[in-house]
Amino acid sequence: MESVTQVLATTNEISLKGGNRRWFERRLTENVRHALADLPVARVQRPAWRVLITFSKEVPFVDVARRLSTVFGLNSMMPISHCGHTLEQVEAALGPHLDSLTATSFAVRCIRSDKRFPMTSPEIEREIGQYVQERTSWTVDLGNPELTVHLLLDENGFFFWSRKIAGPGGLPVGVSGRALGMLSGGIDSPVSAFQMMKRGMRLDFVHFHSLPRTDPASLDKVRELVAVLNRYQGPCRLAMVPLLPIQDQVVARCPAEFRVLLYRRFMLRIADRIAGTFESHALVTGESLGQVSSQTIENLAAVEAVAARPVLRPLIGFDKQEIISLARRIGSYEISIEPHTDCCSYLLPTSPATRSHARELDDAEENLDIDTLVTTAVGDADIERLTDVVDWEGIPVPAGAGG
Ligand code: ATP
Ligand code: MG
């Protein structure tokens, strides 16, 4: 197993953000430290758009890669080795590495952030390139090399790496405001939360249940999903809301064909109120266009009409198979596929409306005291602060990290 004492990561998009750059980078550094909290980190530095992590002793690269794969804003990561302060020392350290690599063509790339060194980057690249060529007889190909020998020169000397793996991309969690994720216990909603975290949002969650009609185990399932998602963002709040009293009224007083859509409208109204107390900017759902009859564009629009905040649907254009691959990459899939009773399947009609209009739903709700139902449900919500996180083994190893 490959062990490392230093890992270099590149950052994503942050260079685009002009005046916010410093703030973004600080947030990213904090998130990196947080993700690596259980490893012996000696230093986290930020040479030129990068994050350089130094450990106080050797750690398996796969452990580092797994943790950094949860830090949005990192574009790639590479295990690096220190190789001295002079070109002679670099060559001596590089030699054995080169012997263990196979390639036919190569290039040397140098990033020189210590400007005191008496040679420029191109000069260093030429000198080391010549050494590599003599040692290996690979040909130089600057356009499309099979192998790139990377050097970084900073105030600590030279570092070398020859392979990198992809990071999670996105923006550091915490730079894009807050949202309230609607978590059902299914496959889609955790993925939708993940996608918004990836754009820098921090999420709290709401879950609606039909206890005692549905299984109380479904609440633990939602907590387990949050424990996976929290690996990507840190602790959050989770509101558990009883929907059964509202569902009973909808069943008793409204046309059967609109049941699911009316349950959904109440979920949005309640989530919207809770979002207010959590200071969330938006609601997030796992809806995907056309996946089920409640997710036709007409129905989505008719349901959404009752929400004051924007309803973000990051999976709207995703196929189920794409959502499943993401769920596997996140580590939520195995939990999501455990059987549970969905509160929306409660007393479903045989033919639900597929093309409703907001006005029709308004009419269907005529005999309900909407405000009282919503206020009561919000008052009956249990709000938990969730600090639990899944063991790191519950987060998949990123591709190429070994292990
Ligand atoms: P999921 O896999 O997330 O359950 P789904 O494809 O089964 O999604 P629906 O059951 O129609 O679709 O739900 C659509 C979205 O509505 C969910 O992704 C979720 O964001 C929200 N939602 C549905 N049921 C609940 C619930 N019980 N609590 C909170 N949010 C819910
Ligand atoms: Mg569902």
Image (cartoon, helix red, strand yellow):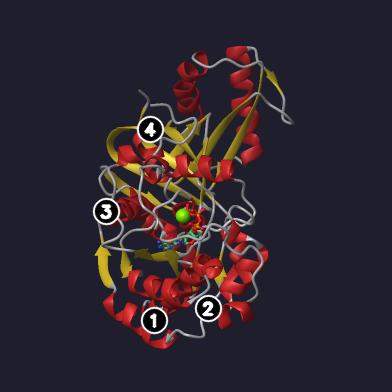
Q: Say what amino acid the circle numbered 4 marks.
A: Val
Q: Is mark 1 within 8 Å of ligand 1?
A: no
Percent coordinates x, y for residue 382 in the rendering: 26, 71
Q: Is mark 2 within 8 Å of ligand 1?
A: no
In three-dimensional space, the C-alpha distance between marks 1 and 4, rounded to whole angstroms, equals 48 Å
**Few, some or many residues within 10 Å of mark 2 (<14, 14–19, 20+):** some
Q: Say what amino acid the circle numbered 3 marks.
A: Asp
List the residue tagged with mark 2: 307
Q: Which residue is at a point 47% across and 44% down the rendered structure image?
A: 327
- Foreground pick, 200 / 142: 200
Kind of element beneath mark 2 = loop
Q: Say what amino acid the circle numbered 2 marks.
A: Ala
In three-dimensional space, the C-alpha distance between marks 2 and 1, rounded to whole angstroms, equals 13 Å
Q: Which residue is at a point 44% across and 31% down the rendered structure image?
A: 401
Q: Quadrant of the C terminus?
A: top left
Q: Earlier in the sequence, mark 4 or mark 3?
A: 4
List the residue tagged with mark 4: 62
Kind of element beneath mark 3 = helix
**Few, some or many residues within 10 Å of mark 1 (<14, 14–19, 20+):** many
The quadrant where residue 313 appears: bottom right
Q: Residue furthest right?
A: 143
Apparent side of residue 91 relative to residue 138 in the rendered image (left or right): left
